[in-house]
Amino acid sequence: MTNHNRLSVVIPCWHDELELPRLLTELTECSFTSLTELQVIVVDSGNSELCREICRNHNATWVSSQPNRGLQLRFGASLVESDLLWFLHADAKLTGDPIGNIRIALQNGAVGGYFAFRFAGKPEWQGRLLECLINLRNTFGVPYGDQGIFVRRSAYLAAGQHASWPLFEEVPLIKGLRGLGRVDKVSQGLLVNPRRWHRDGWWRRSLKNRVLALGFALGIPAVRLAKFYAKNS
């Protein structure tokens, strides 16, 4: 019988040992707030002993995988023990009661959902403008994995799961979910780490992301795009 008070969280990792402990601590705190039993699965493509130790110290399951985010997510999802799945990036920051907000969305009939795009940290006008543009794009396009996609396990399987690609792996999943029912945007609960935008520059980073998205839309294989992404990250 499904435990409706349990939530399975899948976190793909690749050299994220600096960010992961904070996220695991925040998950524990928000699960206590919502009285939810958590199963946390960290899928590590770096095969890091430090990552394994961090998971052990935070009561999370550590498993290793090849460096391909789509395969990491699929592998993690295959290990879940509940009907509610939440996919998080290791550098996500949680605020308020994200688990409670997930439950409300699903109880109101959504088959899945994601969080509004909001940057963590001190507000900067460039970041706030990008937030508005990205949230507008989500209305017509696909939210990406850094927005904390959540879904019922039955819908996840019916929609075809994440694609086994290293990049844009959530695109066919979101399209499949929208074919099954409503995919809700939750306004509060998760913040995106702006470190890559700070490192590369707000507009340079955003332009690179759009070039990758355009290439994907034009049919360039995700594997080729991922090599370009890695070379320029």
Image: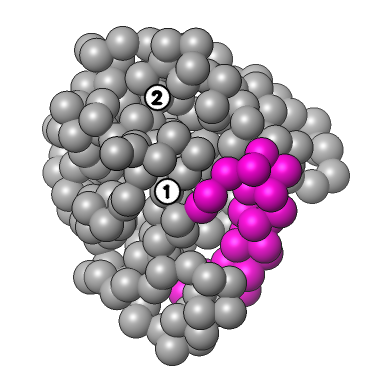
Q: In the rendering, at what x and y percent does residue 73 appear? A: 30, 52
Closer-to-camera residue (85/142) = 85
Q: Residues in magenta?
A: 15-38
Q: In the rendering, at what x and y percent does residue 173 appear? A: 26, 31
Question: What's the residue at 31%, 26% (across, down)?
Answer: 174
The quarter of the displayed image where residue 75 is located: bottom left
Query: Is 226 positioned to the left or the right of 87 in the image?
Result: left
The answer for how far apart the CA atoms under marks 1 and 2 are is 14 Å
Question: What's the residue at 21%, 38% (across, down)?
Answer: 161
Closer-to-camera residue (14/148) = 148
Quick check: 124 above or below 224? above
**Mark identifier at residue 8:** 1
Query: Is 139 positioned to the left or the right of 45 in the image?
Result: right
Query: Quick one: quadrant of the N terminus?
Result: top left
Q: Amino acid at mark 2?
A: Gly
Q: Give the secondary structure at mark 1.
A: strand
Name the residue beneath numbered marker 2.
112
Query: Quick one: quadrant of the C terminus?
Result: bottom left
Secondary structure, magenta segment, majority class? helix
Q: Is residue 192 visible?
A: no
Q: In the rendering, at what x and y percent does residue 39 appear? A: 45, 56
